[in-house]
Image (cartoon, rainbow, N blue to C red):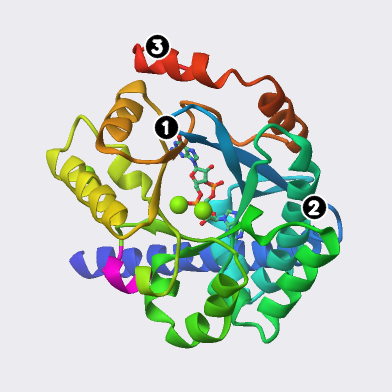
Amino acid sequence: EAKAAGRNTVRFYAAAQQQRAERLLRLSTALGMALTRGELYLQYQPQVDLRDGRIVGAEALLRWRHPEWGEVSPAEFIPVAEDTGRIVEIGDWVLREALAAARRWSDLPDAPYVAVNVSVLQVRQPGFAERLQALVQSLALPPQRVELEVTESVAAGHADVVRRTLQPLVQAGFPIAIDDFGTGYSSLAYLRRLGFRRLKIDRAFVQDIGRDADDEAIIRAIVQLARTLGLSTVAEGVETVQQAQFLAAVGCDVMQGWLFSAALAEADFAELCRHHDAPGWRQRWLAGQAG
Ligand code: C2E
Ligand code: MG
Ligand code: MG
Ligand code: MG
């Protein structure tokens, strides 16, 4: 009997694995057509200066609306796009879209920058830096208004990419932010030497503010060390007034998260910028009121 149960478990496991493989294949095939079929689009999540409440920029976040399945989560399809290499083509499209949006934001209050996530496969493509520079030139967009978000593992673990592509981009004036910082083991001093500008403190730390003294200590240490080294800090996934107050108190520069706004359609982001009352908003959450 025990043997039979074992066989059933194996069979069940194999079936689940096959289902998973089939789903991945379906996703990857559909993703291959998503770009030409116009199913991909971007949303923009505002980033706010914690000291004065101004909207300083927005992160471009990729979205996929499939005609039958509806919205597919980036957490699901981006890893598939990376595994299949489709992220290269999709990522180039994201850059063109996001930079065109930033160009349109030139007349908004404080001319917000756009932050774009770039994957290692994408920055590894020959000529990536040259194409990006040509793109900002053709749009007459200052590179300072295009922030590139690379993950800690790319910044610290791919010396070839850093030297051939990221360093020239730093030289050309593109700010580079280290995404999901704190989850890897890179040295801040090393990242600083490479000329990277900012750290995005991972949501995993932010969400435990007020609940986990270790996470609070880590955030405090990251912010202090970053400041000493002349790097600025962005906290991601800020959802509560308590988190914002803690971040402001420890000297974090910028925050991004649902407390201020979810990711928005471009038109809604522009509207928000036009009507944003920075001092009033900051006053409200400092006083302990949400939103
Ligand atoms: P990320 O770059 O760390 O982006 C932040 C993620 O946190 C986004 O998830 C965003 O919607 C979510 N988020 C923002 N505020 C809050 C909040 O207050 N609470 C919570 N719980 N979550 C919040 P999203 O849009 O699902 O994106 C997931 C990841 O997909 C991104 O993580 C990024 O690594 C990747 N990604 C998104 N767009 C692109 C892209 O165009 N290219 C590449 N290569 N990767 C992308
Ligand atoms: Mg990001
Ligand atoms: Mg992140
Ligand atoms: Mg924790």
Q: Is residue 126 left or right of residue 9?
A: right
Q: Looking at the image, which residue is at 20% across and 50% down?
A: 221
Residue 243: image x %, image y %? 32, 29
Q: How many marks?
A: 3
25 vs 209: above or below: below
Helix, strand or loop at disc 2?
Answer: helix
Q: Is residue 111 left or right of residue 287?
A: right
89 vs 59: above or below: below
Q: Amino acid at mark 3?
A: Gln
Residue 186 quadrant? bottom left
> What's the magenta region?
184-191
Residue 277: image x %, image y %? 59, 17
237 vs 175: above or below: above
In the image, the residue with mark 3 has its CB under 8 Å from the nearest atom of ligand 1: no
- Closer to viewer: mark 1 or mark 3: 1
Quarter of the picture holding the N terminus = bottom left
- Closer to viewer: mark 2 or mark 1: 1
118 within the magenta span: no
The residue wearing badge 2 is 100
The tag earlier along the polypeptide, 3 or 2, is 2
Q: Amino acid at mark 1?
A: Leu
Q: Amino acid at mark 2?
A: Ala
On residue 289, which mark appears?
3
Circle 1 crowding by C-alpha within 10 Å: few under 14, some 14–19, many from 20: many
As measured in the structure, the alpha-carbon distance from the residue carrying label 2 to the one carrying label 1 is 27 Å
- Residue contact at pointers 3 and 2, CB within 8 angstroms: no
The residue wearing badge 1 is 50
As measured in the structure, the alpha-carbon distance from the residue carrying label 3 to the one carrying label 2 is 36 Å
Circle 2 crowding by C-alpha within 10 Å: few under 14, some 14–19, many from 20: some
